[in-house]
Amino acid sequence: MQLFIDSANPKEVKEMIDLGIIDGVTTNPSLATKAGIDYNEAVKQILSMVPANVSLEVLSTEAEGMIKEARSLSKLGKGVVVKLPATEEGIKALKTAKAEGIPTNVTLVFSANQALLAAKLGATMVSPFVGRLDDIGLNGTEVVEEIRQIYDNYAFETKILFASVRSPLHVKQAALIGCEIATCPYDILKSLVKHPQTDVGLNKFLDDFKKSGQKPIS
Ligand code: E4P
């Protein structure tokens, strides 16, 4: 399973690369606003650090504009994956992108049917926004389970990218469902390794060793 960082903050991206746990990045203009950084500048910096799997959003609403942007974005680097919205225009653009060999991430997916269409047209990955479904009282994880089943039923190769992650529990659910990817905010990635019992246990080992008066083997 791959883990991506969902961020437009180059410092966060760099820290996670150094930690060695991320395989890619998803970003969007809202994340850049949140990070207080110019979106174009963030994209440039992220692409200089991450060679593969960098999902970048198109900002047009018409298929023609989306495709023009997709062509320009994919020229920025080999690792660029173009994010197209799950709208009728996005689906139109997806067909052309597929024909031109541009890797795509169909984003803002909120239903299994949207994911079905994305897979039929050969999207590289599809991003169900789980947290935003949960936010409005629906069950985002259930939608991902449906997508998994549909993709398995027809052997679709489109990867499921569990997006809009709100908690470490979402990451575990993504892994249990069999999503190929989960994209997580920085804080969630940092929290994955944490367990209070690990800290308690480690402190006890260190304490007991100190009390024994021995020195570490060197
Ligand atoms: C993914 O591509 C999106 O940037 C992201 O997961 C959206 O998450 P949010 O609902 O926390 O904004």
Image: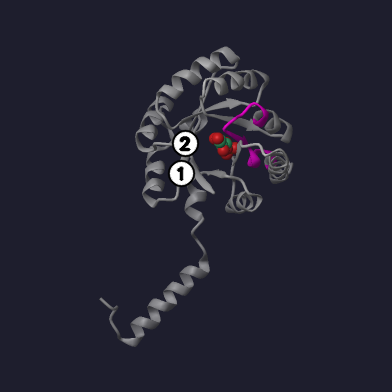
Residue positioned 52% across, 70% down in the render: 197
Residue visible at 64% across and 22% down?
91
Q: Amino acid at mark 1?
A: Asp
Q: Tell me whether the residue at label 2 lies in contact with that at label 1, contact meaning CB atoms closer than 8 angstroms.
A: yes
Q: Which residues are magenta?
A: 119-134
Judge whether 140 appears above or below 101 on screen. Answer: below
Residue 53 - label = 2
Does residue 215 appear left or right of residue 46 in this picture? left
Tell me: 138 left or right of 211.
right
Give the labeled residue for mark 1: 23
User: On screen, 193 above or below 94?
Assistant: below
Residue 37 quadrant: top left
Q: Is residue 152 above or below residue 45?
A: below
Q: Secondary structure at mark 1?
A: loop
Displayed-image quarter of ligand 1:
top right
Q: Amino acid at mark 2?
A: Asn
Kind of element beneath mark 2: loop
Is ligand 1 less than 8 Å from the beta carbon at label 2?
no
- Disc 1 packing (10 Å; few <14; some 14–19; many ≥20): some
Residue 76, above or below 9 = above
Q: Residues within 10 Å of mark 2 (few under 14, many from 20)?
A: some
Q: Where does the image place residue 191, in percent across and percent down from the top left? A: 50, 55
The colour mode here is one colour
Residue 174, label in figure: none
In the rendered image, residue 41, in percent from the top left (x then y), is placed at 38, 27
